[in-house]
Image (cartoon, grey):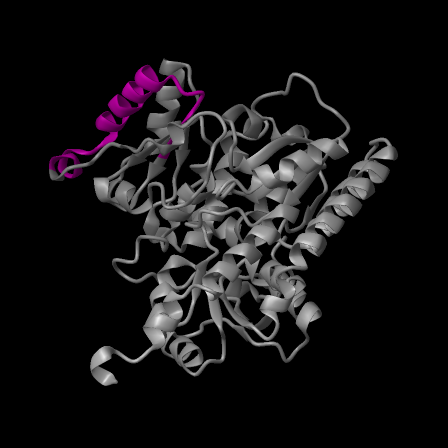
Amino acid sequence: MSVADKVQEVFNEPGCATNQAKTDKERKKGCSKALKPGAAAGGCAYDGAMIALQPIADAAHLVHGPIACLGNSWDNRGTRSSHSQLYRTGLTTDLSELDIIHGGEKKLYKAIKEVVAQHKPPAVFVYQTCVPAMIGDDIEAVCKHASTKLGVPVIPVNVPGFVGSKNLGNKLAGETLLDHVIGTQEPAFTTPTDVCVIGEYNLAGELWQVKPLLEEIGIRLLSNISGDAKYHEVARAHRARVTMVVCSQALVNVGRKMQERWGIPYFEGSFYGVSDMTDTLRTMTRMLVERGAEPELMDRAEGVIAREEARAQRRLQAYRPRFEGKRVLLFTGGVKSWSMVTALEEAGLTIVGTSTKKSTAEDKERIRKKKGQEFHMWDDLKPREMYRMLRESEADIMLSGGRSQFISLKAKVPWLDINQERHHPYAGYDGIVTLCEEIDKTLSSPIWRQVRAPAPWEV
């Protein structure tokens, strides 16, 4: 299937509520905005594909293109691995002007051969970028030939940056897994409590906050797509009994097609906040019992939930008086646009509004149910308006990603990173306590009194 056909198939995703509401004409237009020249970092489809697949830690990730494409996307997320560190090795064919003239297919094959010989990975992902796509390099043919010759799965990720946005790249990466990886291997054994989690990238080790709770209940995480993942675990994901989709904006197509092909039911959930974490554990356990797991699983889940909720509430109690009257501007997207609202309010903070630029219709509906129709949701909050809100003290702290931090700092308002570059895990019952601790340290830092004070020459 060509890239154009695959893009159109993704645009017609039945699992997306926004897509269902569109006319046929609107559906053909797709859901991505026109890209801006130079906005490669965090903005193009290739970068989105890297974000979704690079956390498969023991695989080699080879970028076919100029070296700048690898430089813009390598290691830009804080995903962690408990085993192989190969995913953190930057590998590129480093196309030159001569390669563009003569074609880069031979150079690509030599690079794959060298990667396999040197690193001996269980698989190699090869990423197509704009330049080789425009000169006509057929990476699918090269990968197929390399797989046959070298005896290692070589997977073409045919998602050049110019086809669309980062979010489209996430979805096309999911399609790559469905076409070439998931279902290609069988697990040594299966259990009635095997689950697959989709869209959890183990940022700052967040999966490690949740996995011990699942194991204590008796749930086996058969496959995580794709944080802290091994290639063979992803290849065996089709034997899970239940699938959880963490970020539906990015990978709902994988959850739906796994249900369609292998009959695995899926649900959308969140690991952020006490109540959302509890809802997730209950939903996952209930679905497993419905599919044949022992009923005692529910009792064990309720025991873990009761203990962890009580423990989290005791630890959060210390922060509530300190957070009284403190207002938060939440500038993020996707699952965090609604799940963080719940988590922050449980700690006693007041949310003045949240961005929904990268959120699905389901995400927005969840926010309305939690906060009502009058709650501020911005699809596109301009930097100038954001600066005005902060400068006029409409919020006491901003939680966002690194790209908008300077607006907050310019307004001399505390800022905390909650996006992919963060260094602290905020998922699970322990994660909400860590988040409160970081917010408290940020709000109470003496630096804010200093920067707001008049300069010596102004006194």
Residue 125 drawn in magenta = yes
Judge from the rendering whether residue 295 lies leftward or rightward of residue 228; answer left or right.
right
Is residue 62 shown above or below 370? above
Q: Report x, y in % for residue 351.
A: 58, 71
Is residue 405 shown above or below 130? below
Q: Report x, y in % for residue 363.
A: 61, 62
219 or 241, nearer to the observer: 219
* Residue located farthest toward the left when viewing the structure as drawn: 98
Is residue 203 shown above or below 25? above
Q: Report x, y in % for residue 333.
A: 51, 61
The span shown in magenta is 98-126
Q: Residue at x 82, y 31 (%)?
A: 293
Which quadrant of the structure image shows residue 21?
A: bottom right
Judge from the rendering whether residue 52 lies leftward or rightward of residue 436; answer left or right.
left
Q: Is residue 400 visible?
A: no
Residue 146 drawn in magenta = no
Judge from the rendering whether residue 82 lies leftward or rightward of residue 294; answer left or right.
left
Q: Residue at x 49, y 44 (%)?
A: 203
Image quarter in which the N terminus is found: top left
323 or 163, nearer to the observer: 323
